Image: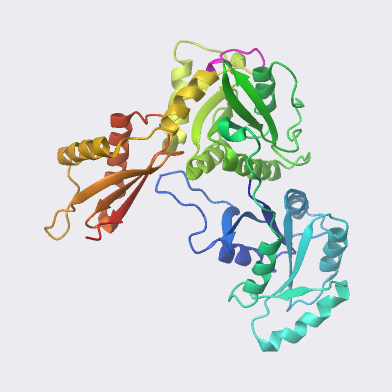
Amino acid sequence: MKPVIAIIGRPNVGKSTLFNRLAGGGKAIVIDEPGATRDRNYTDCTWNNRPFTLIDTGGFEPAAEVEILVQMREQTKLAIEEADIILFMMDARDGLTPSDQEIARMLRVVKKTVFYTVNKVDGPRHEALVSEFYRLGIEKLYPISAQHGPGLDDLMDDVADCLPEAEPVKDGEGDRIRIAVIGRPNVGKSSLINRILGYERTIVNPVPGTTRDAIDTPITRDGKHYLLIDTAGIRRKSRISLTMEKYSIVQALKAIDRADIALILLDAEEGISEQDVKIAGLAMEKGTACILVVNKWDLVEKDNSTIGTYVEDIRYNSKFLEFAPIIFVSALSGQRVTKIFALIERVYAQYTRRVETGELNRKIREIIEANPPPGRQNRPNIFNYITQVAIKPPSFVLFVRDPDHIHFSYERYLVNRIREAFGFAEVPIRLFFRKKTS
């Protein structure tokens, strides 16, 4: 589980500029799958080989009464509660404002590591502006320029030194299939966990945001070992739906980092939503195997075409997960809940499958001969060799003459044929192209 760093401060102090600079350089996960990567204001980053999840927030105005500013303030409070480390940004050119002082007073009672940064110190002429901020009684300030970079190395080196170590795998956890139950608030995540376990392991409450932290439960079924990871929608109750959705994603990120398989819960009454697709996209980006679980199926009026209509809608709205199996359940009544484990076993077998290199190369030659890749400047783009380099997810490296000119449509063709040939029908596949060096 990665630690979380939240950037907070008044509006227009440069929070998003800092976020974009730290998220740059290829640190955010990107895959060539339509629909998988979506706009968001959180990302996975690394500094000095220390990974963390970074969150940007809206501007914080402590005394605001306008609704949008109240919402932004609530969002920031959630970020403070969610984060392991807080970067509090102020603006050197504005000087120390009453809002800065109010935020600083609030942070003094927060049991979190806080780094106080003074932004827009773009050169020696601005350095004298920093002294005013020592009125906060802070021992160390970090003058930075989020736009141009000065001061960021000193800040982030110190931040990295404070990041908690990655949590070690608990005894026995490595032998278990780790299953994250993720989804929007109030889709029935905790109810599903309780139904699987047969007792009330987690609090079930119709108010979104009841579950406060990820809850791990090791279980054994039919001699097979699992670890169920139940996740929160939020850290605290709130009526602000956008804020709740944002922090359901943060919790999903944490759970996906540790999971082999994600059970992505959808609400049958509401259908698949944009937020569901965002959460599914996170799992896809991470390479986590996915099962789409349509919950509350007992509440839907049905006819002969109902399931087909639901499946078509889900597939249309999450094309990047066209391979993921779908199951319709009711956590309340228990309908088909036990069948989830047969799917888990089937998907996990594919997720951990290795293909012998000779067999892989024989088949890839047949696949390429059936549909050769387009050449360039009258030269064929020769494929030399393929090898599987990883599982979870199955990942392959293909050595070719000109890897930069493999079109995404041809890559999709290869992925689909590999799925069919080697039994990877229900799991993500990673395919990398490398230039043959000899």
Whether residue 426 can be seen here = yes
Is 342 left or right of 131, judged from the image as shown? Answer: left
Quadrant of the drawing holding the C terminus: bottom left
Q: Position of residue 234 (x, y in %)?
A: 72, 40
Image quarter for residue 242?
top right
Whether residue 14 can be seen here = no
Q: Position of residue 186 (x, y in %)?
A: 68, 30
Residue farthest bottom in this picture: 125
Q: Residue at x 41, y 44 (%)?
A: 34
Residue farthest front in this picture: 171
Q: Position of residue 228 (x, y in %)?
A: 63, 29
Eyeballing the image, is 417 above or below 199? below
Magenta stretch containing residue 265, yes or no?
no
Quadrant of the drawing holding the N terminus: top right
Range of residues picked out in magenta: 332-339
Is 97 left or right of 253, judged from the image as shown? Answer: right
Q: Residue at x 44, y 35 (%)?
A: 321
Q: Residue at x 49, y 23 (%)?
A: 345
Magenta stretch containing residue 333, yes or no?
yes
State the predominant SS element of the stretch in magenta. loop
Colour basis: rainbow
Along the viewing direction, whichever of 277 and 406 lies nearer the viewer: 406
Q: Position of residue 14 (x, y in %)?
A: 66, 68
Image quarter for residue 55?
bottom right
Is 382 left or right of 250, judged from the image as shown? Answer: left
